Image: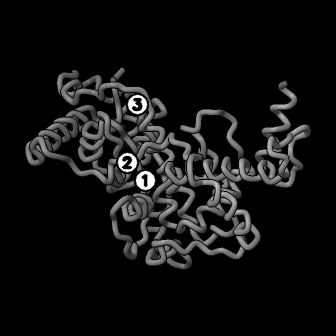
Amino acid sequence: MNKVPAATLAASVTAALALLSGQAAADGASKEKCYGIALKGQNDCAAGAGTTCAGTATVDYQANSWKLVPAGTCVTIVTPKGHGSLNKGDAPA
Amino acid sequence: MLEIQDAFTRALLERDRPIPPGLTCSNGLRPERRFAIHRDNVVAGLIATLASRFPATQRIVGAPFFVVLARAFIDRHPPRSPVLLEYGKDLPSFVEAFEPARDLPYLADVIRLEAARGRAYHAADMPPLDPQTLAVLPQERLPFIRFDFHPATSMIRSSHPIVTIWAMNADGSKPKPVEPWLAEDAMVSRPTLNVRVHRLPSGGGTFLSLLAAGSPLGDAVEAALSESPNFNLSTNLAFMLGAGVTTAIR
């Protein structure tokens, strides 16, 4: 394998810096591309008022828990059964 | 005293155990029932803790399934510390072996991503590397520089489109079919005070994990190029500097 010459690296650094300043200019002070950055406070262990009944109710649930199937909003997501594995070859990683 | 506390804790977390010896009830009612309520409150609190740490996960599987999953996890991995900030770090490996979740092979990686966001949120504050530091570096030094990574940075490499799935199940988003189903490497960073989730550019997973492990820039570039012909160094560097992944060069 060939060593990557320092000059190539330097050119890439210059290009990257140009790219960065271009992004900053385009975005202005407003924002940059990112996904849902809000994180809810997560250390509130909410064992407070009103949890008593919720807690007792779920004990019964346990009995049939093994029959449960994930059924959330993600039913619309294609599961990779015989699907994801087919495409895995194209993966960039 | 220690013995009593110990017995109390064990009885709290293991539902089949008898109540701690010597427990009485001031109004003469059956202490078993009073204790059962406390026991359920503790578990309900832990479930709520997990739900607030892993909101996208909960949305993916639905609340009823999440409760069962969390309950099974709490049974097996009760908290070892009174600080719950890190509680749930064993959840990904638990989910991998959790039979009812077998049809969702991407779930564990999505949980890893959410856990990384939590860690980033609580990581130490540090200013990210100023991109201009690289501009003034003599060219011949470039292949040999190493980067210090920001304490808030972590990477999750996945064979599933975890960033897409996570983003669609984050607050206020609308899930839709994922097409095409491609592997995605995720990076979590927190350049200032906001936690960010990024989908790494092609070859970025190899490039950045080598840099994070302390490899010099030249070696990381070569490895990334040989693994992924589409690897674009400028894009990856711009991402790395823009996302505040690093703090210093050595």
Identity, as a three-letter code, of the amino acid under mark 2 = Gly
Neighbours of disc 3 within 10 Å: few (<14), some (14-19), many (20+): many
Q: In this view, does B234 lie above or below A88?
A: above
The x and y percentages for residue B8 are 81, 38
Quadrant position of the C terminus of chain B in the picture: top left
Q: Which of A89 and A46 is in front in this view?
A: A46
Residues flagged by tags 2 and 1 on a common chain: yes
Q: Name the residue under label 2.
A: B204
Residue at the spot x=45%, y=60% of the render?
B162
The numbered dot on residue B185 is: 1
Query: Residue shown at 87%/41% (left/top)?
Result: B20
Which residue has dot 3 on it? Answer: B149
A87 sits to left or right of B233:
right
| Image location (x, y in percent) of residue B174 | 34, 70
Q: Mark 2 or 3 closer to N-term?
A: 3
- The numbered mark, 2 or 1, whose residue comes first in the sequence reads 1
Say if labels 1 and 3 share a chain: yes
Residue B77 visible in the displayed image: yes
B217, above or below B138, in the image:
below
Secondary element at image label 3: strand
Q: Are marks 2 and 1 in contact (CB under 8 Å)?
A: yes
Q: Residue at x 87, y 50 (%)?
A: B17
Three-letter residue code for mark 1: Asp
Residue B166's x, y, as percent? 42, 59
Q: Cα distance, mark 2 to mark 3?
A: 15 Å
